[in-house]
Amino acid sequence: MAYPNAYTAYKETGVKTASQGKLIIMLYEEACRQLQSAEGLFQEDDKIPPKNIEKLNKCVVRTQEIISELMVSLDMEKGGEIAKNLMALYVWFNQQLLEANINRNKEKIVSVHNMMSSLCGAWNTAVETTAPVAAPESYSSIDING
């Protein structure tokens, strides 16, 4: 069936044509999805069944990879204090997730998820408020030939 290939092509096009801000939001959104999946693997007593240990590891490692990508995307020269603070936060996120993965600690996963969700909202607001304004339609068909 061609549908999976079409969907993959659609996603790839979305990534290739996205602005830098939108790419960061996409990374945050995927990290939040992975963390939500990880949270869902725990039982009500916050224990993880043995059958879900590998799934938990995959979700946490994917999230850590995304966080590493966010770290690499920081421009420490132009970003100033904000970039330094984000870097420190990303390092802390990865440390918390490492500990959560080793100790199977749902609380740490939830904590990182909540903070990443808040940051995603902040990035969304920043991208929406700084997006370039589209040119009025009257400019779109200017004839430079006179």
Image: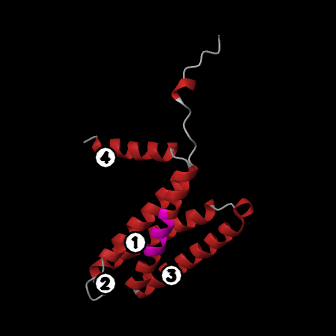
Find residue 74 and report its horizontal and vertical position in percent: 64, 62
Image height of 124 relative to 113, above or below: above
Question: Is residue 116 part of the magenta span, yes or no?
Answer: yes
Question: For mark 1, what is the residue?
Answer: 35
Q: CA distance from mark 3 to mark 1?
A: 12 Å
Q: Earlier in the sequence, mark 4 or mark 2?
A: 4
Question: For mark 4, what is the residue?
Answer: 4
Disc number lying in front (2 or 3): 3
Residues marked 4 and 1 touching at CB (< 8 Å): no
Q: CA distance from mark 4 to mark 2?
A: 32 Å
Find residue 59 and report its horizontal and vertical position in percent: 40, 70
Q: Earlier in the sequence, mark 2 or mark 1?
A: 1
Amino acid on which disc 3 is placed: Gln
Q: CA distance from mark 2 to mark 1?
A: 14 Å
In the image, taking residue 22 as reference, residue 144 lies left or right, namely: right
Residues marked 2 and 3 touching at CB (< 8 Å): no
- Span shown in magenta: 113-121
Amino acid on which disc 4 is placed: Pro
Question: For mark 3, what is the residue?
Answer: 96
Q: Residues within 10 Å of mark 3 (few under 14, many from 20)?
A: some
Q: Earlier in the sequence, mark 3 or mark 1?
A: 1
Q: Quadrant of residue 82?
A: bottom right
